[in-house]
Image (cartoon, rainbow, N blue to C red):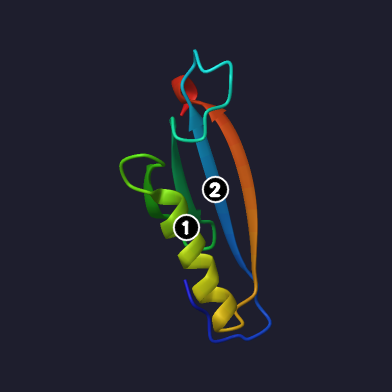
Amino acid sequence: MFRSNDDQTLKFRLVNAYAPDDRDFLEDEYDVSLYDLDDNKLIMSGDYYHNKIHVRINGFFKALDYYDIAYDVETVRVNSDHY
């Protein structure tokens, strides 16, 4: 994931998978996965309630910010039936 080339921006995809019957958005009722698009690998996955995944993902990006590592994040919302 980390490159020796300082000008390269890391690319990530954040996938929010919602239950098909979830008409009203409830933040604690969906799964989240974070992918490294450069290496095509899953970094972490979990749900908001059991895994506190939002805290882990925020910590991951804060660490990148702390070390001044440039990154782009693409956020995708999908129905969990198609995930």
Residue type, numbered disc 1: Ile
Q: Is residue 42 above or below residue 29?
A: below
Q: Position of residue 59 (x, y in %)?
A: 47, 66
Q: Nearer the viewer, mark 1 or mark 2?
A: 1
In the image, farthest residue toward the left: 50
Who's the residue at 52% across and 18% down the image?
22
Q: Position of residue 24 (x, y in %)?
A: 58, 19
Label 2 sits on a secondary structure element that is strand
Who's the residue at 59% across and 76% down the image?
65
Label 1 sits on a secondary structure element that is helix
Badge 1: few (under 14), some or many (20 or more) residues near its Cα, within 10 Å? some
Q: Is residue 47 left or right of residue 68?
A: left
Residue 41 bears which disc, if any?
A: none
Instruction: For the residues labelled 1 and 2, say whether their Cβ atoms are less than 8 Å apart.
Output: yes
In the image, farthest residue toward the top: 21
Q: Is residue 21 above or below residue 68?
A: above
Residue type, numbered disc 2: Leu
* Mark-to-mark CA distance, 1 and 2: 9 Å
Who's the residue at 36% across and 39% down the image?
49
Q: In terms of image quadrants, where is residue 77? A: top right
Q: In terms of image quadrants, where is residue 81? A: top left
Residue behind mark 2:
14
**Disc with the residue nearer the chain's start (1 vs 2):** 2
> How many labels, in total?
2
Q: Position of residue 62 (x, y in %)?
A: 54, 71
Q: Position of residue 72 (x, y in %)?
A: 66, 62
Residue behind mark 1:
57
Who's the residue at 51% across and 35% down the image?
27
Q: Is residue 54 above or below residue 21?
A: below
Q: Pick the residue in front: 34 or 48.
A: 48
Q: Is residue 78 left or right of residue 34?
A: right
